[in-house]
Image (cartoon, rainbow, N blue to C red):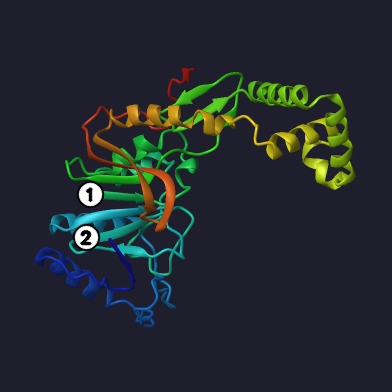
Amino acid sequence: MAYGVLGLGITIIGISSTKRYLIQHQNAENTRPSSPPPPSSSTHAIALPQTEEIYSLDNVIGRVREARREGVKTALFVGRTNDQSVPIETGWVWFTLDCEMMPGNCSHHLNINFNHSGAVGKIANLFDKILVDYSVIKAFSGSPWDTLHRILYPNKSSELIVESDKGGGGIGPTLFIDGRNGTMSFSYSDYFNEEKSSFAQWKEGVGKRVTEEEYQKYFKRRVAGELEEYGLQSELAFMRFILAREKIAPLYPADKYRPQLLNAIADYLRTLFDNVELKRGPYPALEEVVDDYWVVSSPKKVLQRHVYQESPTRKV
């Protein structure tokens, strides 16, 4: 997948149907007020014309449908920002989607809030490939997988590339894993008890005298401002200093239970897609190595689910 400039005309050269669509689209675009030439080939940023263009979501959706009628593959970059380039692939036409970012050239941008079911319905089954920018699905209300599955064209080759989960974790009375929504919640008090247990074992091992000496040395090197995150609770600050220094701190729940979360997400994704794969390496939207991300394909035909309804969670 290459990345390049998407200006008033698209610079892809591909199969005959692709060329026909691009020529038609370029001729239509050229009837509008002229804009400065795109940047040189050394840059990958999208060219931003100086002239204003009256935006119409329906017109952009019409271009997607036009490309499909011409036999051109359509792809969608969800959550793209102005400093990110749009992929260029032979035989493909790329569009972008975001409700906040409006590029200077809007001919291929869908100004849609992905949490608005009615707006998402306008582009249902229109894309052969979807690439979701990193750190975007955390903004989805409810299940990102349901929404993105809805947009993909139902074909064995249709593909979704998306980060592995929403990240972090909420605080709750106990541990809950939610594969449908890509989230988890856990008990902070359980984690705090694990911290205290590890600290008690350290104190027992070194003895009271060493513990008191370490305590006094620690606070001679600290000022009140450095303890604010602990609410000036000196014992808590000292305990976490020792846990970190001795490398005996318990694994934070968001990390400890993440494998279980990924398994739950994979189980849910298999209800939507025939092929589900968790990959590690350069993330296509970033070209940077990330911990892991999903590449899923061959969307299944399922009964339309209420995308924003909270799914049942599992107590672990």
Observer-nearest of 107 and 161: 161
Residue at the spot of label 1: 128
Nearer-the-camera pick, 221 or 144: 221
Task: Tell me whether circle 2 and circle 1 mark residues in contact (CB < 8 Å).
Answer: yes
- The residue at 51%/39% (across/down) is 167
Residue 199 image point, x, y percent: 73, 26
Q: Secondary structure at mark 1?
A: loop
Residue 121 located left or right of residue 84: left
Report x, y in % for residue 312.
44, 20
Q: Identify the mark nearer the N-term, 2 or 1.
A: 2
Q: Quadrant of residue 12?
A: bottom left
Q: In which quarter of the view is residue 288 placed?
A: bottom left
Question: Does 221 sit left or right of 314 as displayed?
Answer: right
> What is the distance, in whole Å, between disc 2 and disc 1 at their CAs?
9 Å
Q: Identify which amino acid the numbered label 2 is placed on.
A: Trp
Q: Residues within 10 Å of mark 2 (few under 14, many from 20)?
A: many
Q: Tell me the amino acid under the disc marked 1.
A: Asp
Q: Which mark is residue 171?
A: none
Q: Which residue is mark 2?
A: 92
Q: Compare residues 109 and 195 and report the one nearer the observer.
A: 195
Q: Is residue 60 above or below residue 161?
A: below
Label 1 environment density (alpha carbons within 10 Å; few <14, some 14–19, many ≥20): many
Query: Compared with residue 119, is residue 12 higher up or lower down, i.e. above or below?
Result: below
Disc 2 on helix, strand or loop?
strand
Does residue 233 show up? no
Q: Is residue 3 visible to the viewer in this orientation of the structure?
A: yes
* Image label count: 2
**Could you tell me residue 285's position as x and y percent?**
39, 56
252 relative position to 268: left or right:
right
Residue extending furthest left? 16
